[in-house]
Image (tube, rainbow, N blue to C red):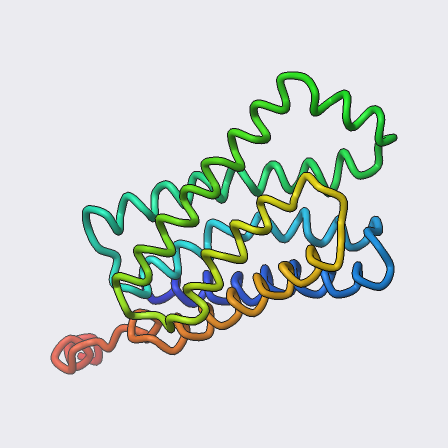
Amino acid sequence: MTAWLVRFGAVCGFVLGLCIGVPGVVEAFTGETTATSLVIGIGGTLGAPVVTALYLAQGGGRGFHTLAFAVNMIGLSLFGGVGFMLNVALFHLDPAVAAEVLAGPARIAVYGGMGVFVAGTILFCVSMARARVLPAVPVLGYGVALVLLAALAPLPDTPLTSLVHLLVCVSLVWLSAAALRGPAAAPAVRPATAAAGDAR
């Protein structure tokens, strides 16, 4: 089961990276569009399987590693909802109406969710760096680029936004590839005695 979850999460990591990076590059030339916003909004739903795969690829762990994973998982879930709302729902509203929506109680939920996401991202980045199982460069990219992504989410898109999207894409794809090559993704080998018993 662990190997399957790692492989599934790694595939989700490839897809999520592309869902963030490709629209980000396109928007650098076209600006935000309905299609790019939809892809980014829906792609955010893949965050939980990805972080699960990265956690399991390091052998799980206890204490700080488990805490970092838990906070990151909750933060990703909250930020995925925030991203879906910003990119799929509010994008189609008149800017004045969208601003009015965010001026109410929704502002607390949005910024609260983003705060948990940032905290979880930093903790999980530190956890991966301490474990020294996954490559250091994308681990650092994961921490820096995702925090910048959260900081830029409520702001108008700029070339910096597109660059951050691309950095997130590269980091996620790189980490997913590393997890896929690791021992945790290898199918379990059944003992020869058990296989012989099944044959009888």
Q: Residue at x 32, y 74 (%)?
A: 187
Most extreme residue toward the top is 104
Q: Residue at x 32, y 47 (%)?
A: 68
Asked if residue 22 can be seen in this view, the reply is: yes
Q: Is residue 153 left or right of residue 60?
A: right
Q: In the rendered view, would you say 127 is above or below 120?
A: below
Specify whether 79 is left or right of 74.
right
Image position, residue 107 (x, y; %): 62, 24
Question: Based on the displayed image, in which of its 4 quarters is residue 99 positioned?
Answer: top right
Residue 178 appears in which quarter of the rendering?
bottom left
Q: Quadrant of residue 125?
A: bottom left
Left or right of 124: which side holds 131? left
Horizontal and vertical percent for residue 163? 67, 63
Task: Residue 167 in the image: state x and y as whole percent.
Answer: 59, 65
Where is residue 189 drawn, in percent x and y? 24, 77
Picture residue at 53% right of the left edge, 69% below the top = 173
- Please give the name of the residue rendered at 19% of the width and 46% of the height, measured from the top-left corner: 63
Decide: is 53 above or below 37.
below
